[in-house]
Every structure is written in structure tokens, then in C-alpha cells.
């Protein structure tokens, strides 16, 4: 539901306001969804949004109208040249962290920070191995990045120890159990080896690692995209501000802690390249409707941004401007080309035409893997669905009838994918 998310954003923004006013008053900009950019000082936050001063005027801005808040580090973002090579760790939630070098020690990644702006303290990192999708060396080299992209199309359900050769990249498949305490080697179980039979492989002889991470049962919602002066991009599930600094916790569970907000460049509330499924054209598959059903809804497999009664989408007495209303025995397939990291929706049974016994099974698949499957009932509260879709090329939404002809259309309010 929207209300808890809005409350979370309000609390996060309030904490950031306090920090900004204390250290960097007057350094803030707000860009609105109407395309306006306001320069001034963030003054206060309430349940409706923020109050921002521009000159002598105090301007209230609803939270839903905020695209981005620019922070003190917005003019200090480093642009690393070819003389400053870097590595990159990509998390399962799509976050990216740039480091001078990295090493896997035990089940956590450690690294050396790249040079930063003068007077800005380097952040500290807590990166569990279970949060990492890949760790790539020579990430500054466009040819190397292209080679990685090509190689990743061949990956399976095993970890990969990547090796660079004159003719390109190759790899060993198996399981990376952990790094040695000094970060020089990894304990690697090759594919086909006896269970528990491992060998040590040198980390400095590898071009990087790829981890097979099964889809988690639950995923924390992203509240905003955090950018910092080091070029890191973090999909934040939580932001904590204290006298000791600012800690950003990513959706995948990694943490980055900054000494102050001077190392932060922006908070992107638009979340960067959000695609609403109601704006996309899916491939539609489904059984023919019975004649009685056709009289009510003539061969309508799904409706975009409207309900069965041709009115606004509504769940739990809340109206939503965007979403899908999907008929039973329908499958919608969207080509998202691996460009997105998260799927979000509020799911329930359409309130228009549904009776108290209405129910339908909703299944969501990513490249054939079931990410979510649950029976939704009209009498139950709508359900927040948040899924990781990192690397997924085809997203499929399947609605199956629980009982026939009882108005069991599934509503997916605000259904979207985001980077």
C-alpha cells in the first residue's frame, strides 16, 4: 500500500533534513515532476511532503511531486579517467559500488576506496557475499565490460571464477564457498567435484567472480536511489542519519556508511527509468471466454489503467492512477531485456463486479522461474508484491481462475519494473 511507503519516505527525508540544515544549509535543490527546479533550503517535512524556501517564499511540495533532491556533493562527483582504473561490485538489487580493488575475505568483500574530493572522508563498506551478483576487475575498460556482458549470457546456476586470456574471458563453474582470511585465495568447489571437496584458487589470477544467487522469498522495497561522489549507485531500502554519519542499507542487505552528507550527491525518488507495465504492450495468451463471460466483458484479456467498470483502479478503498486488471486464464508476457532490477505491485481482486467469494491465483515468472505464486481472495487485504528481476529478459504474469464467472479479475495497482 502507498501509505506505509510514504510514511517511510517522510521519516527518511526528515532525518536527512536535520543533517543538511546542520551542515550544508542553502545547498539543496528540488526538482519536481512538473519539470520545475527550485533552489534554496529544505525547511521541514510532514505527511504531505516537504517545505522548501526560495528567497522569501516558503513552498510546500507534495512528496508525490518530488523527482530528486540534490545534496551537498552534487558538484563533487568524481569522473575517473583511464589513469584511475577501478573495479566494480554489482549487487543483486542492481546497486553498483566502485573500488580501486577488492578482495573476498571470508564471506565479505573488502576493498580500497578510489580517490575522492578534497575534504570528503571515504565511506566504509559492509558487503556480504550473499548480496553480490558479480565482482569485476578492469571495470573502467569498455572492451572488458563488453566481454563480461557477452560472457554472462552463458551463465548457469553455478558460481563462476572468471579468467582473462588473450583471446577473451573464460571461467570455471562451481561454488565459491569463501575467501581466505588474508584475501589472497578463495575456497572453490569445482562443478562435478565430490561434495565438500574444494581447492584454493588465487584471487589475483582471476578477472573477477560471478555468483549464482537464488531469488529470495521476500525483497525489501526500494525507497530511493542514492548517488554519491565516488560514482556509487545504491538502491536504498533504508537510510539512517546520526551524529556518527549516514548509513545507506541497500535492498540486498549491503551497507555503506558515510561520515557526513557531504559525500552524497542526490536522492532520486523517481528511482531512475521506471516502466509501468500498463504503458507496455505484452504478448497475450489465454483461453477463450465462455459466452456468459463475453456478455459482461467481450473478450477483454486485460485493461490498462482502468477497472472492469471502466473507472479508476481501486483496492481497499484506495484509488490508483496506474495498473492492470487481468482476466482469469490469461498470461501476459513482457520483454524487459534484463534492463530492470525490481518488480513492484499492489495485488488484489478487482472490486468492480467481484463478490465476497471471488478468488484467483496470481503467478509471476522471470525467464521461466516462478518468482511469486499465491491465491488472492476478495475478502483479504491487497498484497504488496516486491520481487528481484535483475537480469530477467521475459517477465510473465499469469492469472488462473479459482472458480468460474465470479468476477475474479486480478488487479495489479501501480505495477512496474525499475532499475
Image (spheres, rainbow, N blue to C red):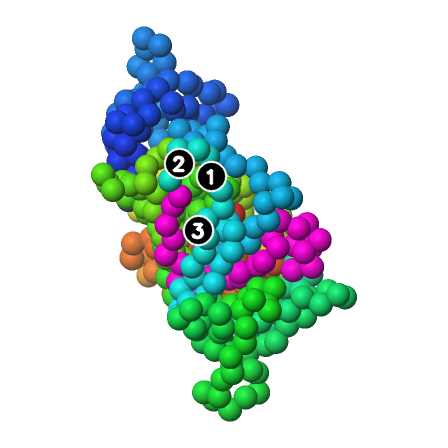
**Place of residue 282 in the rendered image (x, y in percent of width and height, measured from the top left):** 61, 52
In the figure, 15 relative to 101: above or below?
above
Q: Disc 1 designates what residue?
A: 116
State the SS at label 2. loop
- Residue 131 in the figure: left or right of residue 56: right
Q: CB atoms at circles 1 and 2 under 8 Å apart?
A: yes
Seen from this angle, which residue lies furthest bottom? 194
Reply yes or no: does residue 249 show up in magenta. no
Q: Residues within 10 Å of mark 1 (few under 14, many from 20)?
A: some
In the figure, 94 relative to 211: above or below?
above
Disc 2 to disc 3, C-alpha distance: 36 Å
- Using the rendered image of the protein, determine whether residue 12 is visible from the camera's viewpoint: yes
Residue 137 occupies quadrant: bottom right
- Using the rendered image of the protein, determine whether residue 93 is visible from the camera's viewpoint: no
- Residue at the location (35% across, 10% down)? 55
Q: CB atoms at circles 1 and 3 under 8 Å apart?
A: no
Mark nearer the N terminus (2 vs 3) = 2
Instruction: Please provide the residue range marked out in magenta.
Output: 122-148
In the figure, 171 relative to 410: above or below?
below
State the SS at label 3. strand
Q: Nearer the viewer, mark 2 or mark 3?
A: 2
- Residue 206 in the figure: left or right of residue 343: right
- Residue at the location (56% across, 82% down)? 190
**Place of residue 68 in the rendered image (x, y in percent of width and height, measured from the top left):** 44, 31
- Residue 28 in the figure: left or right of residue 343: left
**Place of residue 300 in the rendered image (x, y in percent of width and height, measured from the top left):** 56, 51
Disc 1 to disc 3, C-alpha distance: 35 Å
Disc 1 to disc 2, C-alpha distance: 7 Å
Q: Disc 3 designates what residue?
A: 344
Amino acid at each position: 500500500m502507498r501509505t506505509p511507503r510514504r510514511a517511510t519516505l517522510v521519516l527518511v527525508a526528515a532525518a536527512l533534513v536535520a543533517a543538511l540544515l546542520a551542515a550544508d544549509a542553502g545547498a539543496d535543490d528540488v526538482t519536481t515532476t512538473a519539470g520545475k527546479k527550485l533552489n534554496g533550503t529544505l525547511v521541514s517535512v510532514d505527511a504531505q511532503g516537504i517545505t522548501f524556501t526560495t528567497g522569501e517564499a516558503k513552498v510546500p511540495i507534495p512528496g508525490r511531486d518530488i523527482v530528486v533532491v540534490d545534496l551537498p556533493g552534487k558538484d563533487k562527483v568524481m569522473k575517473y579517467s583511464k589513469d584511475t582504473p577501478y573495479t566494480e561490485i554489482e549487487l543483486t538489487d542492481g546497486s553498483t559500488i566502485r573500488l580501486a580493488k577488492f578482495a573476498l575475505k571470508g564471506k565479505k568483500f573488502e576493498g580500497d576506496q578510489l580517490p575522492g574530493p578534497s575534504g570528503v572522508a571515504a565511506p566504509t563498506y559492509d558487503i556480504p557475499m550473499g548480496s553480490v551478483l558479480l565482482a569485476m576487475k578492469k571495470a573502467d575498460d569498455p572492451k572488458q565490460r563488453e566481454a563480461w556482458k557477452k560472457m554472462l549470457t552463458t551463465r548457469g546456476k553455478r558460481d563462476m571464477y572468471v579468467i582473462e586470456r588473450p583471446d577473451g574471458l573464460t571461467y570455471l563453474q562451481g561454488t565459491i564457498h569463501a575467501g581466505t582470511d588474508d584475501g589472497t585465495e578463495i575456497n572453490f568447489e569445482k562443478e562435478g567435484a565430490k561434495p565438500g571437496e574444494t581447492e584454493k584458487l588465487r584471487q589475483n589470477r582471476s578477472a573477477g567472480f560471478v555468483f549464482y544467487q537464488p531469488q529470495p522469498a521476500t525483497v525489501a522495497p526500494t525507497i530511493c536511489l542514492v548517488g554519491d561522489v565516488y560514482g556509487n549507485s545504491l538502491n536504498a531500502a533504508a537510510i539512517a542519519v546520526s551524529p556518527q554519519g549516514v548509513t545507506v542499507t541497500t535492498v540486498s542487505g549491503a551497507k555503506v556508511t558515510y561520515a557526513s552528507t557531504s559525500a552524497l550527491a542526490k536522492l532520486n525518488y523517481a528511482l531512475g527509468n521506471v516502466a509501468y507495465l500498463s504503458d507496455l504492450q505484452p504478448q497475450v495468451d489465454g483461453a477463450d471466454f465462455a459466452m456468459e463471460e463475453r456478455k459482461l466483458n467481450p473478450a477483454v484479456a486485460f485493461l490498462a489503467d482502468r477497472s472492469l467498470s471502466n473507472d479508476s483502479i481501486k483496492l481497499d478503498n484506495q484509488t490508483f492512477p496506474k495498473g492492470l486488471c487481468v482476466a482469469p486464464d490469461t498470461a501476459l508476457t513482457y520483454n524487459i531485456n534484463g534492463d530492470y532490477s525490481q518488480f513492484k505491485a499492489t495485488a488484489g481482486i478487482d472490486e468492480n463486479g467481484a463478490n465476497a467469494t471471488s478468488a484467483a491465483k496470481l503467478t509471476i515468472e522471470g525467464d521461466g522461474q516462478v518468482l511469486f505464486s499465491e491465491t488472492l481472495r476478495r475478502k483479504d487485504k491487497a498484497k504488496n508484491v516486491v520481487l528481484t528481476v535483475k537480469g530477467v529478459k521475459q517477465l510473465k504474469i499469469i492469472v488462473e481462475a479459482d472458480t468460474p464467472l465470479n468476477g475474479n479479475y486480478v488487479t495489479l495497482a501501480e505495477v512496474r519494473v525499475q532499475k
